[in-house]
Amino acid sequence: MTVGSGTPIEGASVDHVELFVPDRKEAAEWYERVFGLIPVPEYEAWVEEGPLMLSGDDGETMLALFEGEPTGDGEPTGYRRVAFRVDGETFDAFVDSLSDLPVPDGDGEPIGPEDVVDHDLSHSVYFRDPYGNPFEVTTYEVDRVGE
């Protein structure tokens, strides 16, 4: 059977991505400041024994923060990166806010507007959270970027 053609999970979307962080409360504050993600009230019961679930869209897509150490070498533990899609206006606003955040690249250096990557069909910025987990913010509204 061809994937996406009558499969039982056809039309499925990303539910959550799991990350290990040393301090979930500290990490949640960072994710709120950078991405606007907040704890999802429906999953607060899991916090004691499981993940702290964060979302920016009322739980449609979530980050699941587990207490634990990332690999420490800056490499992801089981995934390549988490990408957030935004419209062109939001992308520009995010890029404009980079000096206030700041968010580091893979070498620990803060990224800025000069780090926007033009992929022709999209524009992206790549960075890491304080624990070495890789992220991307991308837009497909390339005609609106930089207006």
Image: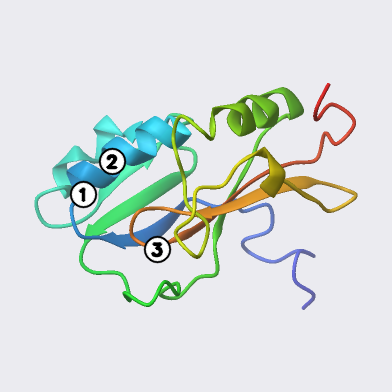
**Which of the 4 image quadrants contains residue 19?**
bottom left
Answer whether residue 92 is visible to the viewer in this image: yes
Of the 4 image quadrants, the one containing the C terminus is top right
Q: Are marks 1 and 2 in contact (CB under 8 Å)?
A: yes
For the residue carrying disc 1, how many other residues have a C-alpha within 10 Å: few (<14), some (14-19), or many (20+)? Answer: many
| Three-letter code for the amino acid on which mark 3 is drawn | Gly
The image shows residue 137 at horizontal and vertical percentages of 62, 44
| Three-letter code for the amino acid on which mark 2 is drawn | Ala
The image shows residue 1 at horizontal and vertical percentages of 77, 78
**Residue drawn at (40%, 63%) of the image:** 132
Q: CA distance from mark 1 to mark 2?
A: 6 Å
Q: Secondary structure at mark 2?
A: helix
- The answer to whether 47 appears left or right of 12 in the picture is left
The residue where tag 1 is placed is 24
Q: Secondary structure at mark 3?
A: loop
Q: Earlier in the sequence, mark 2 or mark 3?
A: 2
The residue where tag 3 is placed is 132
**Which of the 4 image quadrants contains residue 21?**
bottom left
As drawn, the residue found furthest toward the left would be: 48
Answer whether residue 37 is visible to the viewer in this image: no
- Which disc, if any, is residue 28? 2
